[in-house]
Amino acid sequence: MTDVTSMTIAELRDGFRAGEFSAREIAEDYNAAVVAGRALNAWTVETPELALAAADAADAARGADALKPLSGIPLGIKDLFATEGVDSTAGSNILKGFKPPYESTVSGKLKQAGAGMLGKLNMDEFAMGSSNETSAYGPVISPWKRSDGGNSALTPGGSSGGSAAAVAAGMAPGVTGTDTGGSIRQPAAFVGISGIKPTYGRCSRWGIVAFASSLDQAGPMARTVRDCAIMLEVMSGFDPKDATSLDLPVPKWEAGLSSDLKGKRVGIPTEYRIDGVPAEIDVLWEQGVEWLRDAGAEPVRISLPHTAYALPTYYIIAPAEASSNLARYDGVRYGMREMGVKSLDDMYAATRAAGFGAEVKRRIMIGTYVLSAGFYDAYFTKAQKVRTLIKRDFTEAFERCDFILTPTAPSAAFGIGEKMSDPLAMYLNDVFAVPASLAGLPAMSVPGGLDGQGLPLGLHLIGRELDEQGVLNAALAIEERAGFTARAEKWW
Amino acid sequence: MVSDYRISGATGEWEVVIGLEVHAQVTSNAKLFSGAATSFGAEPNTQVSLVDAAMPGMLPVPNAECIRQAVRTGMAIGAQINRWSRFDRKNYFYADLPQGYQLSQLYFPLVGEGEVTVLLDEKDEASAKSIGVERIHVEQDAGKLMHDQHPTMSFVDLNRSGVALMEIVSKPDMRSPAEAGAYVRKLRAILRYVGSCDGNMEEGSMRADVNVSVRKPGGELGTRTETKNVNSVRFVMAVIEHEARRQVEVIEEGGTIVQETRLFDPDKGVTRTLRSKEDAHDYRYFPDPDLLPLELDDAFLAECRASLPELPDAKRKRFEGLGIGAYNASILTAEVETARWFDALLDAGAPPAQAANWVASELFGALNRLGRDCTNCPISPGQAAQLLGLVADKTLSGSLAKQVFEIMLDTGEDAGKIVEERGLRQTSDTGAIDAQIDSILAANADKVQQYKAGKEALFGFFVGQTMKAMQGKANPQVINERLRARLAE
């Protein structure tokens, strides 16, 4: 039989439908890959039985001619998604053992569409991190190694690090991620896969553990642009349980895929050329422009003047919202409880001190500080104003172009431990990703090539609000031209 | 009208300045941001959704009915309705607050300025005073801690968690306990007319935070204290009296009033410090990112306005226009159930002034005696109208009507049937009445003598004797006429 673990979702779907293999065979092979890949620490929970059950249902559906869009496809689900009866801990000790009696809207839609669940994917604690090192389960190890002969363990990026590693290592054909300030795109770039964050409001946030509510968006990560389109179609859609969900029909993105960009203009933002970024990144960016030109798009220089303020703005708004969103983890109703010495306040303090890791505590403290009386206007109000300016930058830029091309991240994957002692250096990872998050725009990372160390680099496309199709099509044009077929050499 | 309520202290008279924040539970089948039920008295934690328990990943979705009720309330007090408002998070930790924040509206409330007119003397329109309302905002209630269930632990009941409250914030316009009492009663009446709150203070559906300060009359405003969660009109007034006196004592003894939150102890009738400004929370209010701003369109507002009932002041004026006295009009409109019952009585054809008198004296008396009210009155407005009709057409005298009414209360039968079956019709048969008068005057010749000598009070004695002899069924007017004629002979 063919190696299903190297196939795309589209290939699995079509092969399964054509009878080339059964869903059970797919699920068994991926379950085996999950077990074989334990050294990567990508999974917090393995649920082979759920993958098999869905596979058997898919096989039965195929017999009954009742196939659903994702029948036969096993997926990994980021641990931030509540999955009914299966540990859902957001990578945190404070939720250790928490089995929700409910299923998030997005993972529920995937299940409804016939997909199986291979397990829950490791992540930075509460999605706060860019290297998966803040997880209570320990860091995820990237399947990639530098070609310098050294054997240092690299990060798969974060916060959707388990998601990225699982796809890159052939442990899942597709996974869910979430992106608050780059958490889908940066890890996708680090491991050489595709990932899209849709327009804010496309995917329901219901049942996804909240980090920063005004920024959080779910999205797919997979090997190809087409696979992302297939998954995103299922994951998107109006949800009356989320007041910020967009009440709009879901476009047929897969059917709409076209790499013919004639008549399109690609914007190249001057402000994204920043000091300290390796030359290889700039070279790839130039190459990306050429690929898009080759596909018919006309490059135009654009300006996004408030780009430099995006990261500081993000690091006020996101922690502010997080400090409030994480107040519910108090030891009273679920999750960890540490009994304090004598009072309720003691119990809160003991529970939260034991349950949260250092990065989460740091962000809660930053958020609490920027919202406190006397500082609110100087920080939070100002940040909200800058956010408006950043949105306006994009609105104005999109009068001159149809989508924007930038690098996804300012570097290739770095070594585990390299940046943990320097939060600011860590935060810089998302310098290119954060502006689109603040503006709520669809944005995608697609593999562009390898750096001198043989590590993947991603290109980043930002589209107009609701124009996921434009983003996917431009990414497809790059994918076709980049010919990125590199896979991490299996060492695990 | 200017209040002359003063606290007499050692250094002279003090004026009291009062503002009230009334928390009114919105009448709605579901909570403000979840579909969970809201009925009172349910078993602990049986009306709790995943949202109310703040489970991971749960999101609030506004309940349009709660917003509608708050808007209608605002319209009922002539307030500005803000088409654009927003929910903010008020952050603090407590075990009865699952999310760790309360959704409220600090910066952009749903309802802006309005006013409530109170009558300090129900008989006197000139005693009217307008109390300003600063704003009405909508917010979530918290759960409840139970400390008596376990020796070392407290239990949490989240049934109330997330229930919609309107916080109705008055301006510091009140100057006496009586004004504050009148304001709370009037506000309660309006809420109950509108149907936005059941006004049940015992069950906690309505409670007030009482802000009190004192100053020399007309002087600079003093520092205020806030007494939380006062749950009856009587207690509101007691808090003001006690707190004002306490503040005067503190100031006159050379102390200063500190801005603080206090609690009322109804058993001892005193307030005591709950927390001072120093340990006040920093609530870190910020706009809730889970919710979009609330924007109200024309159609929604039009429906809110069209659905408003006739309100107490309008109803009272209409009643007065029908010839009903000011006092009766006032008490008939104070409670929405009474007002509705009375309107039904008028609709059934009862003459307004007589009907008002009858309801205010006979019906209220009977209901009071039976421990009932207009919601479970033993007779219907239609039956009452029939009874009043029998009085109007002189079939029944006043005293016969009382007898018939008592039988109606006992049996639930119609007045007409009772009159027919029991022969309680009054008689104007002058022959029969004259015959009785003759025998009574004959039997009391001494009294007739005294009457004629000038002791006119004896007239009532002759009336009473005659009525008694007629077994109460004689037309009293005829008795009067015939007696006067005979005694004048």
Image: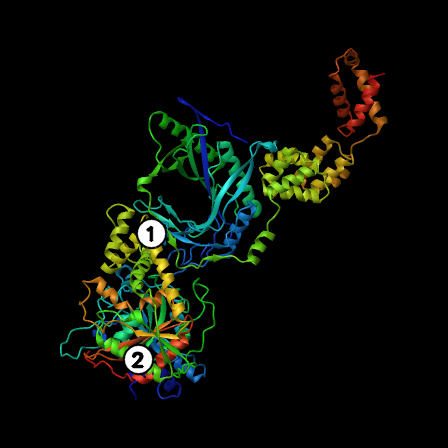
Quadrant into which the N terminus of chain B falls: top right
- Of residues B94 and B202, which is closer to you in this image? B94
Q: Are labels 2 and 1 on one chain?
A: yes
Mark 1 chain: A
Taking the spot 63% from the left edge, 42% from the top edge, the residue there is: B315
Relative to B160, residue A292 above or below: below
Q: Which residue is labeled 1 in the image?
A: A376
Q: Circle 1 sits in a helix, a strand or a loop, which is it?
A: helix
Q: Is residue A77 shown above or below B412?
A: below
Q: At x 36% / y 25%, what residue is drawn? A: B252
Left or right: residue A483 compared with residue A203: left
Q: Earlier in the sequence, mark 2 or mark 1?
A: 2
Decide: few, some or many residues near mark 2? Use Cα within 10 Å; few <14, some 14-19, many ≥20. many
Q: Are marks 2 and 1 in contact (CB under 8 Å)?
A: no
Q: Quadrant of residue A78?
A: bottom left
A39 sits to left or right of B354: left
Q: Nearer the viewer, mark 2 or mark 1?
A: 2
Q: Position of residue B247 (x, y in %)?
A: 38, 30
Q: Image height check: is A174 above or below A439?
A: below
Q: Is residue B146 above or below residue A321?
A: above
How far apart are the alpha carbons under marks 2 and 1? 41 Å
Give residue B330's mark. none
Tag of residue A288: 2
